[in-house]
Amino acid sequence: MSTEPIAQALAAFQRAELAGAYHRAARARRLAIPQIELTALEHLDALGGLTPGALGHRLGLTSGGVTALTGRLIEAGYVVRERHPEDGRMRLLTLTALGAEQLREHLDPVIEPVEEALDGLATRPRMRSRGSWKSWRPGARRSRRPRPDRSACTPPTATRARS
């Protein structure tokens, strides 16, 4: 089996990832916010909300960094911090209507051509039987209540030398 198709697919994926990073930087400049804040908004939009710990884990930030970041987003009116609906001890960060509107304004021009292309693919009989691709779109899972993500709170298992 030739590895050329795999190499081509990997190269295409790398180009798409770089294009995505370039596009995110351009969107952040247009919104006049740092890229890390835009990335946080995108995570909150895609998942319907996260605990501060889970957001920090996804962004690679310390708890102090997440506190500062969420403070800026709350002050700008893009995010709210509320009690978690299932675990009242935890807080949940969610987008406000303004935050969602800002994202949609800058993401819709990018998503619409992709949706059109995927709609064209969905007309093929093979694709129709696999379910709707729209369930993969960011924000599609908002109807479910977010559950506490404790993965960021669980310490990794430490390897210790035996004495």
Image: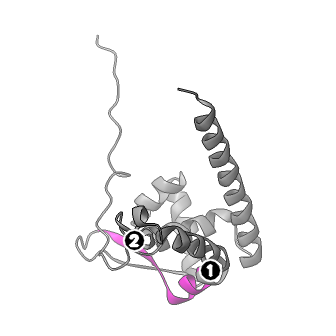
Residue at left offset 62%, top offset 48%:
13
Specify start and end residues of the magenta stretch as a single range: 90-103
Q: Label 1, on which residue?
A: 108
Q: Are marks 2 and 1 in contact (CB under 8 Å)?
A: no
The image quadrant of residue 31 is bottom right
Q: Residue 93 magenta-drawn?
A: yes
In the foreground, 61 or 141: 141
**Would residue 108 be seen by someone viewing this image from the given angle?**
yes
Q: How many marks?
A: 2
Closer to the camera: disc 2 or disc 1? 2
Callout 2 amino acid: Ser
SS state under label 2: loop
Residue lying farthest front?
A: 125
In the foreground, 18 or 135: 135
In the foreground, 17 or 39: 17
Asked if residue 163 lies left or right of residue 23, the reply is left
Residue at left offset 64%, top offset 75%:
113
**Would residue 49 be seen by someone viewing this image from the given angle?**
no
Residue at left offset 45%, top offset 75%:
139
Asked if residue 5 lies left or right of residue 66, the reply is right
Mark 2: give few (<14), some (14-19) or many (20+) Cα within 10 Å: few
The image quadrant of residue 127 is bottom left
Q: Label 2, on which residue?
A: 132
User: What is the x, y in percent for residue 133?
Assistant: 44, 68
User: What is the x, y in percent for residue 29?
Assistant: 77, 71
Asked if residue 19 lies left or right of residue 126, the reply is right
